[in-house]
Image (cartoon, helix red, strand yellow):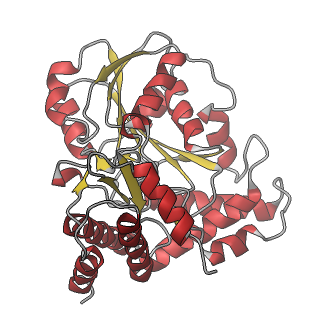
Amino acid sequence: MGRHFLQIPGPTNVPDRVLRAIAQPTIDHRGPAFARLARELLERLKPVFGTRHDVVVYPSSGTGAWEAALVNTLSPGDRVLAFETGHFSTLWCEMAARLGLVVDLVPGDWRHGADPDAIGDLLTGEHAAVMVVHNETSTGVRSRIPEIRDAIDATGHPALLLVDTISSLASMEYRHDEWGVDVTVGCSQKGLMLPPGLGFNAVGPKALARRGRLPRSYWDWEPIIAANRQGFFPYTPPTNLLYGLREALIMLEEEGLPQVFARHDRHAEATRRAVRAWGLEVLCADEREYSSTLTAVLVPDGHDADAVRRHILERYDMSLGTGLGRLAGRVFRIGHLGHFNDLMLAGTLGGVEMGLLGAGVPIKEGGVRAALACLEEGSG
C-alpha cells in the first residue's frame, strides 16, 4: 500500500500537473496553435540553459543529443580531449570513437571531476573540442565548467567546449553563455520533470559557425533551427511531451530558478549529512565537486550495494540507483532532484536507514535526524 518511492537519479517523478498537460488532445503540428506553443516553449527554455541563443529540441533521449552535439560540429578524424569522470563520460567517448573521431581520454578515479589544471598540458593544436560531463550521473561528481573554460582560454586554443548537463539541467546552476560553453547537451527526464523522450542542444554562435563534416541528417541543426523560426519542426514533433515541457517550464518559473537551485543544494547537503552520520562515505572526494542532484554512497567492504537496493525495494517499495561500470556492487545512488521536497527527502532517507539496518550493513543510527536538523537550519 502507499506510493512507490522513485529515488533514482532519473527518470524522476513527474508532477501531476505535467501529466495532465501531457494528456491534452493532440493538435495539428502544422497549424497555428502548435506554432504558438513551439515559439513559446523555445523562448522559455533559454533561461534554463542560461543562453540567448538557439536551443534545439529532438524527440530523443540524451544519447541522441550527445550524437547531435558531435555530428554538427566535428569532422572525421578530428581529435577531442575528454575526461573520464564516470560511466556516462566513457559512453559519450565510445560514441565519439564510433563516429570516427579520435578521443584522447584523460583517465580518472570516478571520485573527482575533470581537472582544469590539466588542460594546459593536454590540449594540443590537433584538438577540435573538449568534452566534459558537468554532473556525472553515475558518481554524483560535478566538474567545474567555468574553470575548464578559463583553462582553455588561457592557452588561446580555439577548441569548442561541449558539455553534458543531463543530470544537472534545471536543478543546478548552469550558465551556457556566461561560462563560454559552445554546445550544451540536456534531456527531459531529470530536472525538467518529464518522462524520457526529449533531447536538447543549446547551440552557441561559435558552434553554429563551426560546421563539421560528419554525416548527419536527422540530427542536423540547420533545418530544425530554420523551421523553429516559424514555430514548426522538419519532422513530426512529440506534441504531447511539448505540452508537458511547457507546464514544467512554467513550474520552474513560478518557483524561480535561484530558488530551484537552492532547494537542490539544501537537499544534497542534508543527504550528505545523513550519510556521514551513518558512518558511511560519499563517493565524491572533493567538496567543491559535490552534486546537488544525487549522492552516491559507498558501502563497506564485504557488503553488496545491490543487495541493499534489493532489500529496500522489496521491503519498502523504494527504488535507488545502482552502481554502474566499475562501481557495480560498491555504491548505491540516492536521487534528490526534480519534483522533490523536504518531506519526500525525509521519507527517502528513512527508507535508506531502515534498509541499511535490515540488510545487515553496520551503520550508526541517526542519519535521518542529522538530515532533518540540516533542513531545519535552512528553513528560516
- Identify the image quadrant of residue 42: bottom right
Q: Nearer the viewer, residue 128 or 278?
A: 278
Q: Is residue 201 above or below residue 29?
A: above
Left/right of residue 363 with respect to residue 337 in the rendered view: left
Instruction: Report the residue at 42% width, 35% height from top.
Output: 325
**Is residue 152 visible in this depiction of the protein?**
yes
Instruction: Report the residue at 26% width, 13% height from top.
Output: 125
Q: Nearer the viewer, residue 303 or 12?
A: 303
Q: Residue furthest bottom?
A: 380
Split into 4 quadrants, where in the image is the C terminus? bottom left
Left/right of residue 14 with respect to residue 269 in the rendered view: right
Left/right of residue 167 with respect to residue 17 in the rendered view: left
| Image coordinates for residue 137, horizontal then vertical, percent | 41, 48
Please state the total of marks drawn on the protein image. 0
Split into 4 quadrants, where in the image is the N terminus? bottom right
| Image coordinates for residue 188, horizontal then vertical, percent | 57, 55
**Is residue 9 visible in this depiction of the protein?**
no
Q: Is residue 298 above or below residue 115?
A: below
- Identify the image quadrant of residue 374: bottom left
| Image coordinates for residue 279, horizontal then vertical, percent | 20, 63
Instruction: Report the residue at 55% width, 46% height from top.
Output: 200
Left/right of residue 61 with respect to residue 235 in the rendered view: left
Q: Nearer the viewer, residue 158 or 17?
A: 17
| Image coordinates for residue 164, horizontal then vertical, percent | 42, 42
